[in-house]
Image (cartoon, rainbow, N blue to C red):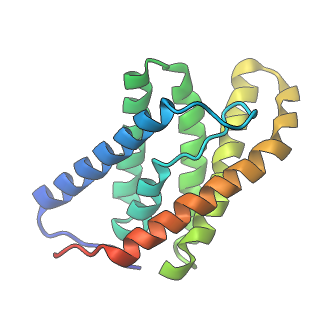
Amino acid sequence: MTQQSDKHPTRRLTRMALLTAIALTIFMVEAQIPNPLPIPGAKLGLANIVTVYAMFVLGPADTLMILLARIFLGSVFSGQMMTFFYSLAGGLLCYAAMLLLRRILTLNQIWVCSVIGGACHNIGQLVAAITIARTPALIVYLPFLLPAGMGAGLFTGLCAQFLIGRLSFKK
């Protein structure tokens, strides 16, 4: 792992703020693009590139703060507070999966972590939808959401892996 241990709290906080702002900007831009798939809730999730990157470069604690800030602010800025619960459930399940996988995967296997994280994200969102709507029949979306989430995870994982391979921060 390339986890950075910053001796300078201001540098660490600034890096986290920048990554949160980048993820939030990507999220807001992507929200303006019409969904090309006929599956409700399916999208690329490009802001997750930042989450995957942070998990392998900054570490779990900083990644969790970036993720939670992006989910909350994205819900507030988009004016769709109901999406907060779906994003939170998906984001936390994805985070838990990546947390476990980062211990066994190398930097050349980040894309694998992201594929599994994408599937977990959609499972978490579906569980939230079933719980909120009290409609277990929503499980019928799972066979459609899983491939979409895994495909999106592959793309975001490859992007994050490329970024980690190209970027290096001076300590």
Quarter of the figure that contains the C terminus: bottom left
Residue drawn at x 59%, y 38% is 89
In this view, 119 is above or below 43: below
Total numbered badges shown on the rendered structure? 0
In this view, 166 is above or below 20: below
Is 128 on the left or on the right of 52, as rendered?
Answer: right
- Residue 79, given in percent of the width and then of the height, sits at 43, 17
The answer to whether residue 100 of the structure is visible from this angle is yes
Q: Which residue is nearer to you in this view: 168 or 86?
A: 168
Residue drawn at x 52%, y 81% is 108
Is 10 on the left or on the right of 146, as rendered?
Answer: left
Quarter of the figure that contains the N terminus: bottom left
Task: Using the rendered view, name the quadrant where residue 85 is placed.
Answer: top right
Residue drawn at x 39%, y 55% is 63
The answer to whether residue 106 of the structure is visible from this angle is no
Residue drawn at x 41%, y 51% is 64
Task: Using the rendered view, name the quadrant where residue 76 is placed.
Answer: top left
